[in-house]
Image (spheres, rainbow, N blue to C red):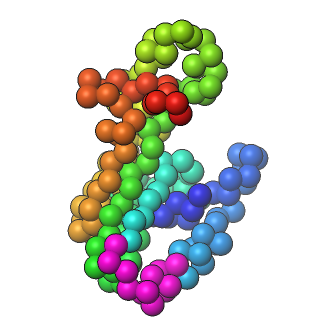
Amino acid sequence: MCSAPVKTSDSDPHPNNQRTHQACDTWRRKAVERIAHLHPMLVVVSSSEAGKPAKELKDPLRDWATGCERVYRRPAGAADHVAALLDNLWPKSDAVERASGCPPHLNDCEQDQRDAVKDPIRQAADQEGVRRAGAGVIDPKPWQCRRSGRCPVAVGDT
């Protein structure tokens, strides 16, 4: 996935590989050009808390928020409305393995929604960038967690 705010390190499994995703920058630029040509009523953008910056950030919250704002503003000039879909919640461990250890009581596998965030700084920065850009927010948390704040390992049959 192409992370919106800054160039991220390649998804190559080798941890010392710090190449940037130039293809993501090119794809994003061309996508915004196409959006401008179409001038839709609504553009839904998203990002992920996965990925690492290619260079260390001096102030991660500020730097990610500034990057998110910049990226979310681009389609705002080309569409009537922009909404940002926040990242899915992240299970503490592999969901399939976790569920296999809980049958028949999958409720025993629930985790608190506060523990289901991959990177709290990036989540906060994403929300701040959305706010600054004047975009709407689509938070998937209510789809994935109960009102109690507990998040099941499976919702319905998924």
| 85 w.r.t. 149: above or below | below
Q: Position of residue 158 (x, y in %)?
A: 53, 33
The furthest residue to the bottom? 37
- Tell me how many marks there are: 0
Q: Position of residue 44 (x, y in %)?
A: 39, 65
* 98 sits to left or right of 32: right
Q: Position of residue 16 (x, y in %)?
A: 72, 49
The question of residue 87 being in magenta is answered with: no
| 123 w.r.t. 78: above or below | above
Residue at 34 percent of width and 23 percent of height: 150
Q: Nearer the viewer, residue 50 or 89?
A: 89
Residue at 59 percent of width and 58 percent of height: 1
* 156 sits to left or right of 73: right
What is the chief secondary structure element of the magenta stretch?
A: helix
- Residue 62 can be seen in this image: no
Quarter of the image for residue 126 reads: bottom left
The furthest residue to the front? 157
* 43 sits to left or right of 4: left
Quarter of the image for residue 74 reads: bottom left
- Residue 80 can be seen in this image: yes
Residue at 36 percent of width and 60 percent of height: 84
| 38 w.r.t. 107: above or below | below
Q: Which portion, as a residue range, is magenta?
A: 31-42
Residue at 68 percent of width and 53 percent of height: 11
The question of residue 40 being in magenta is answered with: yes
